[in-house]
Image: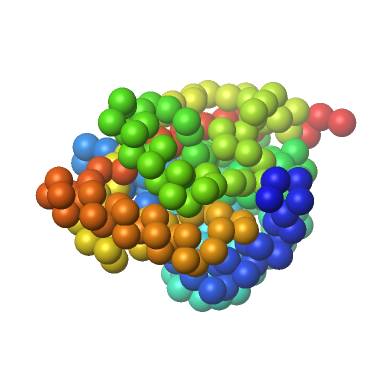
Amino acid sequence: MSENQIDWPGYLREFHSATPGSTEALLSRAVAGDHTPYRWLVRAVSGEAKRVLDLACGNGPVARELYGRWVVGVDSNAIQLDGAPGPKVQADALHLPFANEAFDVVTCSMGLMVLQPLPDVLAEAARVLRRGGVLAATIPAVRPLRRGDLRTLTGLTTRLRSRPQFPAGGEITGLKEQLRGAGFIVMESQRERYVYTVRSIDDARRMVGALYLPGTSEKRREHAAAWMAQRAHDRDGLEVAIPIRRITAMRTTLALS
C-alpha cells in the first residue's frame, strides 16, 4: 500500500485508540548516553520559558520532563490524552483554541510527520507563539546509523515486508523551507542515535507495536517480533537503533502568504 492510498486520519485515529501510549512506551526506553528523546527535546526549552504548549502530546511524556513548568498538552485523540497530566485540551492542531502569542514555547515530539497539512500546522504554531518564541520538535531521521544497525533494521523490515510510514515521509523533506514560510528562523538541526534494547519477546512486541505499518497484518508483526527476540536471546540483547532529528526554530513574523 503506497502512502498516497492510505487514509491517514482514519489509520492514526484507530492506531492510537487501540494502542494508546505505544509510541511513548518505546521512546521512554530508548537512550543515548544519559537521556531519552523526550529529555533531549526539553533541553531545547529555555529555563526562562513560562508558558509551554505541547502539540500532539500523547499521554504527556514531554510535560513530565518539564515538571514544575506550566505546560498545556494538546492532542486530537481523547484516549491518548486521557493519560496525560493536566492542563490538557482535545483539539485539532490546525485550529488551536488559544489566543495569538499565548505561549513562549511550542514543543512537538515525533508529531510533525503526522500532522497535516504541515504548512498550515506550522502557521498555527507560529500564531500562538509570541514573537521570539521557540518551536522545538523531534522527528524520525535516517542517520546516524552504524553498520550493524543497518543489518538489524534491514532484517526487521524484510520480515515485516514493510517499513514505517508517515503522512509527511521520514525526515520531512523541505522542513526548513516550510518553517521559514511559516515565519520561523531555524536555529538548530541536530541528529542523535538512540538505542532500544530488546531482551525479551515483550520488548520486541513493544518495538513492533509502536510502528506505523498500514496494511501489515498482526501475524507479520508477530513474526518480526519473534525474530528480534530470538536474535536477542542469541546475543544476550539486541540493540535496535532509532535515529532522531531535533529541530529548533524561532518565531519572527506571521506566516508568509
Viewer-proximal residue among 146 and 26: 146
Viewer-proximal residue among 34 and 211: 211
User: Would you identify the image quadrant in which residue 199 lies?
Assistant: bottom left
The residue most toward the right is 257
Residue 24 appears in the picture as rendered = no
- Residue 160 image point, x, y percent: 48, 51
The residue most toward the left is 236
Relative placement, left or right, of 221 versus 203 is right
Question: Looking at the picture, does residue 19 appear above or below residue 204?
Answer: below
- Residue 223 image point, x, y percent: 39, 60
- Residue 115 image point, x, y percent: 67, 50
Relative placement, left or right, of 107 versus 125 is left
Relative placement, left or right, of 111 versus 84 is right
Query: Which residue is located at x 47 percent, y 31 percent?
Result: 142
Query: Which residue is located at x 70 percent, y 46 percent?
Result: 2
Question: Looking at the picture, does residue 186 appear above or below residue 245?
Answer: above
Protein image colouring: rainbow
- Residue 194 image point, x, y percent: 32, 39
Quadrant of the image for the C terminus?
A: top right
Residue 102 appears in the picture as rendered = yes
Query: Which residue is located at x 28 percent, y 31 percent?
Result: 148
Query: Which residue is located at x 58 percent, y 24 percent?
Result: 186
Viewer-proximal residue among 123 and 231: 231
Viewer-proximal residue among 131 and 178: 178
